[in-house]
Amino acid sequence: MSLSCVELSLDLLEACFAHALTAEAEEVMGLLLGDVSEAAGAGPGGGESTARIWALSFQQRIDKRPDRVEVGPEQLAAATQAAEDHGQRTGKRTRVIGWYHSHPHITVLPSHVDVQTQGSFQMLDSGFVGLIFSCFCAGAAQHEKRLQASAFQAFAVGGGRFERRLVPLRFVATPRQGARLGELMPALTRVQLAEQQHAFEAAAERLRRLGAEAGGAHGPALESARLHHASLFAAAVTHHLGTTGAALVQATHDRLRASQKRVGSLERERDALLLNGEETSPQGAEQ
Ligand SMILES: [Zn+2]
């Protein structure tokens, strides 16, 4: 199925860029949850398929090499479960319909590897879509950084190869804009902390193995290497808490301000209704 359009809500667009902006040296990735609807008939709009995305599953990177993003079967299974949970909570059919990844410092167009990866996804689900979020690219003006997004699919050209096909990407506003972003940020922080924890534990394990192989030799050197990794871990955690934590605090402030405005508006509405009720009450007419 070739898609005519991809719809992404503005709050998810913000969340994807928030995720992309957390790593300047490596690509980050996640899975897209939603559904694909096909318009029936041959008239205008008939036969067109639209992928609508209404939730995300941030993915933990195991392989941190640049230009390398992979979705393992376990990650896909966890995201499928998250989609099912979302569907049960909201009563709306929800499934994994695509993937996204960031392009720090590079073009928003999919690379050759991206298109081949996309092609293999589409062999399992023809409506699957890929999104790319390009960031940290210099804009025309001084100190300007450009953020760009694209959606694409792949089509087979023979010999097991694929070519890219860009799909129009439409952004839609949602009523709970700021609140939604605030809800998504803790999940993003959890994934990033888990990544750091995984990297630290892998380094500590390597040192333990080296220590065992050395049979007690090089103790001070190995201890100093362990301390080095521990400080890198602490620095990375602090950095992430500084970037995502600050955004979370801002989102909470925005949410508080929006709630206070809503309370004020509801109180005014209540007072007006009470006043109206008093003016038109039968008791008032009798007196
Ligand atoms: Zn890519």
Image (tube, rainbow, N blue to C red):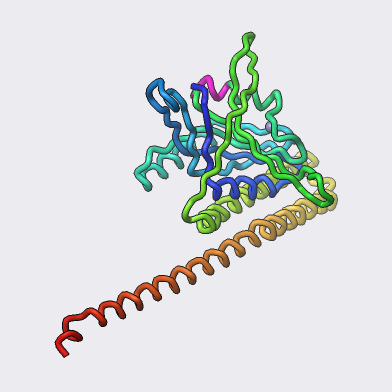
Q: Furthest residue to the top?
A: 159
Residue 155 in sight from this viewpoint: yes
Instruction: Point out the quarter of the image occupied by ligand 1.
Output: top right
Residue 113 in the figure: left or right of residue 282 = right
Location of residue 146 in the rendering, given as x and y in whole percent from the top left corner: 74, 45
Secondary structure mostly taken by the magenta-highlighted segment of the chain: helix
User: How many marks on residues?
Assistant: 0
Look at the image and say whether residue 121 sits in the magenta stretch: yes
Location of residue 46 in the rendering, given as x and y in whole percent from the top left corner: 42, 25
Q: Nearer the viewer, residue 263 or 275?
A: 275
Residue 201 in the figure: left or right of residue 262 = right
Q: Nearer the viewer, residue 278 or 11?
A: 278
Location of residue 91 in the rendering, given as x and y in whole percent from the top left corner: 34, 44
Q: Nearer the viewer, residue 284 or 261?
A: 284
143 vs 58: above or below: below
Residue 164 in the figure: left or right of residue 91 = right
Q: Furthest residue to the left?
A: 286
58 vs 50: above or below: below
Which quadrant is the C terminus positioned in?
bottom left
Residue at (49%, 33%) from the top-left corner? 51
Residue 99 in the figure: left or right of residue 283 = right
Residue at (61%, 45%) from the top-left corner? 16
271 vs 171: above or below: below
Location of residue 114 in the rendering, given as x and y in whole percent from the top left corner: 66, 27
Look at the image and say whether residue 110 sits in the magenta stretch: no
Magenta region:
120-125
Residue at (20%, 86%) from the top-left corner? 284
Q: Nearer the viewer, residue 38 or 222?
A: 38
Residue at (53%, 19%) from the top-left corner? 123
Residue 74 in sight from this viewpoint: no
